[in-house]
Image: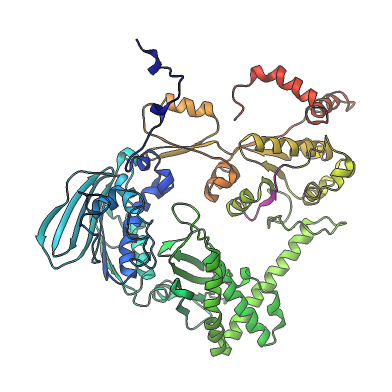
């Protein structure tokens, strides 16, 4: 018997696996649509609809229909040119339609002569939807005939066939999401599809989108119709008027418009108004939504930055012209505290962070948007001085309130004898007093940025570190005194050091070390614990110092999705309940790799996270025995003599199962 097939030790060409066609998508769907959860399968119709929207934006389609046929099947139709059905020159015997739907990175969006701007994934989107659908049925109307072809799980199930003659033109795609990928419980939610269709309509002004839904799928609490037509001839301004029509506002007319970017590279469209409550104060009903090529950028990006900069600078400049000196204190936060606004850009070469395009990153777009809005916003304010003065006073009042709140907070949080300036990198919390507050010391600027988005601003402060910190046990006091980062931590925590510690001056109830779940992360955590032990042992004795526990993996099987903390737990799942089941396993390389909502759910939210409290042995009555023993161990393991560390490692290596945990 050949045992090599059971326990192969060689490594040759036969071990190299080549995934063909759309097999990579089915094997690792998370790489293409962000996962296999509810958000992921609701993203599939967006990909197909984006292609129809691209036809409409390019001027070739006027009407789109979104038809939710059953809980797992949706059909999207447009009256555009229709996907080409002639033979593809590079693939003899295959139509362009078949190539587009079965080959990654194929399509008309690489050529700007076909589409100036596009929201589709440049030939990835339709093929990915095909790969993750149990069935896909496509009908093309063009060249005087109907053309029909079927697919399943990324593969062709019938040749392209010419049907009846027709004068129509367009594309109809019907697909059913695949239970093998998403699980039997995966269903489309009518409200989500309805809102998606409505958003696509107001972002593509003048284009009609018919909404059709199987009435059996709609329940009374959904409050949506089974059929309707979305049509916004003026685009964003029509939709914003619809959303804010019954709400009190400062501006009697909306600030809206559309301007092309330089070199015909794209354009920006916007609509903005300022809401108040019934008493004329800032309203809680405001919102700010942004889009690029009709795709919702829920994490913002450079188009949002440019828009906010233009509006903020414009209102400050108006204040200077009217000699309102208080306007100089206005910041973006004040201006957008009560705004209802939408900004939408169309751009030839957008760059996004992440496959599902939730943040726009082109740096030049910030400048384009700011320059585009500068003159229109200035003219808008100058055209109605009475209203603009009222708006300026409203925003100045918000600025004054912010400044007073910050002053009160700073007085409450700073020590009474030492008025220090907090480091610029600290994103402090807003809660007065110490109870319930937390300081997260985060490894790296990238992870720090994610943590700032994930935090509870009221109770959680974020202090990012550049990387590995000074080992205070193997360096001189002079080097420690010169280390700005560690001395910043002393100032931020506020209670002093071991020799002058004062619990009453402590600024946070918990200090949480949050590092990556890898060797470098553990090293940084060890260095920080050594620092606190050496210079602030009272922080540990008081039960204030903690380690966070970020997960190693995200495990998804069908509609189930959860996080895993160790390789043992993963192995247990794979050999237990989920044995022989298709599962997607994502390994987190670091905190910065997580989305803010993932970091919040797994590592920062008190409701769902796990923390390890750092303790020291309790002091004996004479305060000597246990503390001296601890000091000896810490000094030997973290001190200047590496031979002690080597001895410890060699003596304890036999007990280590997995150094990655």
Quadrant of the rendering where the C terminus is positioned:
top right
Q: Please give left or right for residue 48 compared with residue 92 in the image.
A: right
Query: Residue at 55% across / 74% down in the picture?
Result: 370
Is residue 69 in sight in this rendering?
no
Query: Residue at 71% across / 55% down in the picture?
Result: 426
Q: Please give left or right for residue 325 compared with residue 415 in the image.
A: left
Quadrant in the rendering for residue 330:
bottom right
What residue range appears in magenta? 455-468
Q: Please give left or right for residue 568 compared with residue 518 in the image.
A: left
Q: Give the camera-side residue of 297 and 428.
A: 297
Identify whether 74 is placed above or below 170: above
Query: Residue at 35% across / 66% down in the picture?
Result: 115
Q: What percent of the width, then of the height, locates residue 201?
A: 34, 68
Quadrant of the rendering where the N terminus is positioned:
top left
Q: What percent of the width, then of the height, locates residue 606?
A: 60, 44
Colour scheme employed for the rendering of this structure? rainbow
Q: Give the camera-side residue of 587 and 159.
A: 159
Q: What percent of the width, then of the height, locates residue 297?
A: 47, 60
Q: What percent of the width, then of the height, locates residue 42?
A: 36, 51
Is residue 496 in sight in this rendering?
yes
């Amino acid at each position: 018997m050949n045992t090599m097939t059971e326990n192969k030790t060689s490594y040759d060409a036969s071990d190299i696996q080549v995934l063909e066609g759309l097999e990579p998508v089915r094997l690792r769907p998370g790489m293409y649509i962000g996962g296999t959860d509810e958000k992921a399968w609701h993203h599939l119709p967006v990909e197909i609809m984006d292609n129809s929207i691209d036809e409409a934006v390019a001027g070739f389609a006027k009407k789109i229909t979104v038809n939710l046929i059953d809980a797992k099947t949706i059909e999207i139709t447009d009256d555009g040119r229709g996907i080409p059905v002639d033979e593809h020159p590079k693939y003899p015997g295959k139509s362009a339609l078949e190539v587009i739907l079965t080959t990654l990175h194929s399509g008309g969006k690489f050529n700007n002569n076909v589409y100036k701007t596009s929201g589709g994934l440049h030939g990835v989107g339709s093929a990915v939807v095909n790969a993750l659908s149990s069935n896909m049925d496509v009908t093309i109307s063009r060249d005087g005939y109907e053309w029909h072809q079927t697919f399943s799980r990324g593969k062709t199930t019938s040749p392209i066939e010419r049907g009846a003659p027709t004068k129509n033109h367009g594309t109809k795609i019907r697909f059913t999401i695949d239970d093998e990928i998403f699980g039997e419980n995966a269903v489309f939610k009518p409200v989500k599809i309805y809102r998606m269709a409505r958003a696509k309509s107001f972002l593509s002004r003048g284009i009609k989108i018919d909404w059709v839904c199987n009435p059996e799928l709609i329940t009374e609490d959904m409050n949506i119709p089974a059929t309707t037509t979305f049509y916004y001839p003026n685009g964003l301004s029509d939709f914003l008027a619809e959303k804010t029509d019954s709400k009190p506002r400062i501006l009697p007319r909306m600030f809206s418009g559309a301007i092309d970017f330089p070199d015909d590279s794209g354009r920006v469209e916007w609509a903005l108004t300022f809401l108040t409550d019934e008493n004329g104060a800032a309203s809680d009903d405001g919102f700010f939504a942004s889009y690029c090529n009709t795709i919702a950028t829920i994490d913002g990006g450079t188009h949002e930055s440019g828009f906010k900069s233009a509006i903020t600078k414009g209102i400050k400049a108006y204040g200077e012209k009217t000699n309102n000196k208080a306007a100089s204190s206005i910041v973006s936060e004040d201006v957008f505290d009560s705004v209802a606004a939408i900004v939408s850009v169309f751009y030839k070469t957008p760059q996004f962070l992440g496959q599902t395009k939730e943040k726009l990153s082109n740096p030049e777009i910030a400048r384009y948007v700011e320059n585009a809005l500068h003159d229109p916003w200035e003219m808008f304010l100058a055209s109605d001085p009475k209203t603009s003065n009222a708006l300026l006073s409203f925003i100045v009042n918000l600025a004054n309130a912010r400044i007073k709140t910050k002053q009160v907070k700073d007085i409450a949080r700073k020590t009474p004898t030492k008025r220090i300036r907090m480091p610029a990198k600290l994103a402090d919390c807003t809660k007065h007093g110490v109870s319930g507050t937390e300081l997260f010391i985060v490894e790296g600027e990238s992870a720090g940025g994610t943590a700032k988005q994930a935090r509870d601003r009221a109770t959680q402060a974020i202090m990012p570190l550049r990387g590995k910190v000074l080992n205070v046990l193997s360096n001189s006091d002079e080097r420690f005194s010169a280390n700005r980062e560690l001395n910043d931590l002393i100032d931020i925590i506020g209670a002093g050091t071991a020799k002058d510690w004062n619990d009453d001056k402590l600024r946070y109830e918990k200090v949480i070390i949050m590092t990556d779940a890898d060797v470098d992360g553990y090293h940084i955590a060890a260095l920080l614990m050594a620092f606190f032990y050496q210079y602030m042992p009272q922080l540990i004795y008081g039960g204030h110092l903690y380690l966070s526990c970020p997960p190693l993996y995200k495990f998804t099987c069908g509609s189930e999705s959860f996080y895993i903390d160790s390789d043992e737990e993963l192995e247990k799942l794979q050999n237990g309940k989920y044995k022989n089941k298709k599962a997607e396993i994502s390994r987190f390389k670091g905190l910065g790799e997580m989305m803010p909502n993932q970091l919040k759910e797994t590592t920062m939210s008190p409701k769902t996270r796990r923390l390890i409290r750092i303790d020291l042995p309790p002091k004996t009555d004479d305060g000597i025995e246990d503390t001296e023993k601890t000091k000896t161990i810490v000094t030997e393991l973290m001190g200047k003599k590496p031979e002690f560390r080597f001895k410890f490692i060699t003596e304890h290596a036999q007990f280590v199962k997995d150094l990655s945990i």
